[in-house]
Image (tube, rainbow, N blue to C red):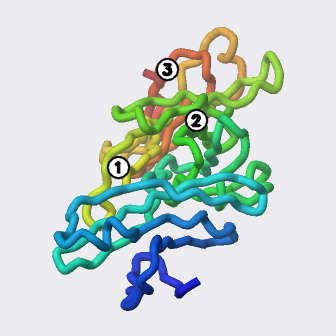
């Protein structure tokens, strides 16, 4: 080891002097992970080159945690006009939870939660709070998600998911007669901007948000029931003026239609 140091997130650390040996590699360590395998950053061919190579190359850096969960980050190498070699370690994908509900994600290939989740996170009621963002660091770029207490989604390849998509995630079946709520969540994969231009954002958002723009009136909404669900307890939603609420379907097999009425009057449902 010719040198080591600690770099805070988003900051830089310079190494001024390097020995005249080949090759020179670098290893990384963060969280409770083991040291990564060394990555060669300088070799004899690079030392013999007089003109700087201004192109950027990117390769994967693999890590393993104490539970033998494999993850990977990306390492980009760029040589500047001044002959300086800049190394940037980053997470190529970042998940943003805007669903309004707790969310879990995991690798469908291995069935385990990723680094950053506690071992008992699936049993917690609020494993990832709404509005939070967290890095996607799986060994393979395939993800399954769960919203609140829904079922897990099928595996989604985020390398090929370039367009907006809608996920329908029903609650697990408990009995033949019990209603099952349906969570409908939109997913988009977009490139980030600014200093995060290397990163792609995976954003999960609710498909429906109810907003009351009827001045001074209290409105009430409910999903239209079928013959099988009309005798069950209605999931009534009250909205005051300018109030908004995330909406999911209470009955996953009933028509995706709502009815509305003014709660402060004797009017019937629409």
Between 51 and 267, the one nearer to me in the picture = 51
Give the distance between the C-alpha atoms of the residues marked 2 and 1, in whole angstroms.
19 Å
Between 60 and 233, the one nearer to me in the picture = 60
Between 204 and 76, the one nearer to me in the picture = 76
Quadrant in which the N terminus is drawn? bottom right
Give the x, y percent position of residue 63.
62, 60
The residue at the point 67 percent across, 56 percent down is: 127
Give the distance between the C-alpha atoms of the residues marked 3 and 2, in whole angstroms.
15 Å
**Which comes sooner in the sequence, label 3 or label 2?**
2
Give the distance between the C-alpha atoms of the residues marked 1 and 3, in whole angstroms.
28 Å
Choose mark 2 or mark 1, whichever is in front: 2
Q: Is residue 226 above or below residue 153?
A: above
> Could you classify mark 2 by the number of other residues whose Cα lies within 10 Å: few (under 14), some (14-19), or many (20 or more)?
few
> Could you classify mark 3 by the number of other residues whose Cα lies within 10 Å: few (under 14), some (14-19), or many (20 or more)?
few
Q: In which quarter of the image is residue 260?
A: top left
Quadrant in which the C terminus is drawn? top left
> Could you classify mark 1 by the number of other residues whose Cα lies within 10 Å: few (under 14), some (14-19), or many (20 or more)?
few
Give the x, y percent position of residue 151.
68, 33
Q: In which quarter of the image is residue 224?
A: top right
Q: Is mark 1 on a helix, strand or loop?
A: loop
Residue denoted by label 2: 236
Q: In this view, does 182 lie to the left or right of 67?
A: left
Residue denoted by label 1: 216
The residue at the point 19 percent across, 80 percent down is: 82
The residue at the point 50 percent across, 52 percent down is: 97
Give the x, y percent position of residue 35.
64, 69
Residue denoted by label 3: 256
């Amino acid at each position: 080891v010719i040198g080591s140091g600690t770099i805070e997130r988003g900051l830089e650390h310079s190494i001024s002097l390097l020995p005249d040996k080949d090759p020179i590699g670098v290893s990384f360590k963060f969280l409770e992970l083991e040291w990564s395998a060394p990555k060669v950053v300088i070799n004899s061919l690079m030392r013999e080159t007089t003109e700087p190579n201004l192109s950027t190359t990117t390769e994967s850096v693999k890590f393993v945690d104490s539970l033998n969960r494999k993850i990977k980050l990306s390492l980009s190498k760029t040589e500047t006009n001044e002959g300086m070699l800049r190394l940037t370690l980053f997470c190529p994908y970042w998940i943003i939870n805007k669903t309004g509900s707790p969310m879990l994600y995991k690798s469908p290939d291995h069935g385990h939660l990723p680094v950053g989740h506690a071992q008992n996170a699936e049993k917690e009621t609020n494993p990832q709070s709404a509005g939070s963002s967290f890095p996607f660091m799986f060994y393979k770029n395939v993800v399954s998600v769960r919203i609140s207490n829904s079922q897990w989604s099928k595996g989604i390849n985020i390398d090929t998911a370039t367009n907006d998509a809608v996920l329908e995630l029903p609650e697990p079946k408990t009995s033949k007669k019990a209603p099952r709520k349906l969570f409908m969540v939109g997913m988009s994969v977009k490139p980030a901007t600014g200093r995060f231009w290397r990163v792609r954002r995976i954003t999960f958002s609710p498909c429906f948000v109810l907003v009351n723009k009827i001045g001074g009136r209290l409105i009430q909404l409910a999903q239209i029931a079928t013959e099988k669900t009309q005798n069950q307890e209605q999931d009534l939603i009250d909205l005051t003026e300018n109030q908004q609420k995330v909406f999911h379907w209470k009955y996953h097999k009933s028509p995706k239609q709502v009815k509305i009425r003014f709660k402060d009057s004797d009017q019937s449902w629409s």
